[in-house]
Image: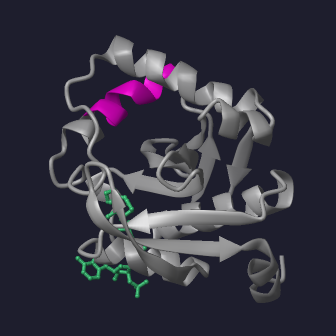
Amino acid sequence: MKLTSKRITLRMHKNEDAYAFKEMLKDEIARKYTGGTVDKTIEEIIEYFKKLNTGFTSELNTIISNKNNFEFAIVNNIDSKYIGYCGIQYCDTLNGLELLYGLKREYWGQGLAFEAANTVIQYSFKHLSLDIIEAVVNPENIASEKILIKCGFRYDKNIECPNQGKVKKYKMDKEIWLTTTST
Ligand SMILES: CC(C)(COP(=O)(O)OP(=O)(O)OC[C@H]1O[C@@H](n2cnc3c(N)ncnc32)[C@H](O)[C@@H]1OP(=O)(O)O)[C@@H](O)C(=O)NCCC(=O)NCCS
């Protein structure tokens, strides 16, 4: 499974991504709004990738019932280097699927997360027969909120999320997405 856009390719995580992934986990600034465990070994990360990749072999209904992720590695089209991750995952608090993304800090500020998010949204609505995608964002995470709005998400309400406190919940309906895109 592989999706390609102008500057990036989204594909399943591979063992060789583990080193770059580990660097990203250790970056306190990149982790500010996402949390997660910092001290994973390469072996633990590879195990985590295996679990992540099972999402690609599941039907949508099992992604939800198995609380799986459908999460891609983002790699650079020029040198194939690992840039970050983007996908959808089951979220207990929402009891539904949410969009998620994160990039290594050296790739911030180039619109790459927007490019990845847009590609995943397009794939999800076209091929996963989803009717709605949700997202939550810390109100201080301005760049992330701008990406959601640029992708066509609409603000829904503020909610309380475990470990994250009060966050803004956004959602996008397939019907609305269809009216705003020609692809
Ligand atoms: C959030 C994140 C993915 C943004 O990625 P990015 O590729 O740098 O985003 P972009 O370059 O597309 O920037 C998005 C917008 O935010 C703006 N922006 C970026 N940083 C900003 C800041 N600190 N303050 C205000 N605006 C900011 C950009 O100018 C851009 O605006 P524009 O579309 O009007 O030009 C990246 O910061 C990241 O990986 N953070 C850690 C993980 C994370 O927080 N994930 C989201 C959890 S909800």
Quarter of the picture containing the C terminus is: bottom right
Give the residue displayed 65% in from the left and 58% down from the top. 120
Q: Position of residue 30 (x, y in %)?
A: 24, 53
Q: Position of residue 58 (x, y in %)?
A: 76, 30
Would you say residue 137 is visible in this rendering?
yes
Give the residue displayed 56% in from the left and 29% down from the top. 52
Would you say residue 76 is visible in this rendering?
no
Q: Quadrant of ligand 1?
A: bottom left
Location of residue 165 (image quadrant): bottom left
Q: Main secondary structure of the magenta part?
A: helix
Left or right: where 35 falls relative to 59? left
Q: Position of residue 117 (x, y in %)?
A: 57, 63
Q: Which one is in front, 132 or 158?
A: 158
Q: Which one is in front, 112 or 180?
A: 180
* Above or below, comparing residue 86 to residue 178 in the picture: above
Quarter of the picture containing the N terminus is: top right
Give the residue displayed 84% in from the left and 61% down from the top. 126
Q: Is residue 16 magenta?
A: yes
Left or right: where 148 falls relative to 110? right
Q: Is residue 153 magenta?
A: no
For the view shown, which residue lies furthest in the top direction? Answer: 43
Q: Which one is in front, 63 or 183?
A: 63
Q: Which residues are magenta?
A: 15-22
Q: Position of residue 32 (x, y in %)?
A: 20, 55
For the view shown, which residue lies furthest in the bottom direction? Answer: 179
* Above or below, comparing residue 68 to residue 132 in the picture: above
- The type of colouring in the image is one colour
Left or right: where 36 falls relative to 88? left
Give the residue displayed 77% in from the left and 72% down from the top. 174
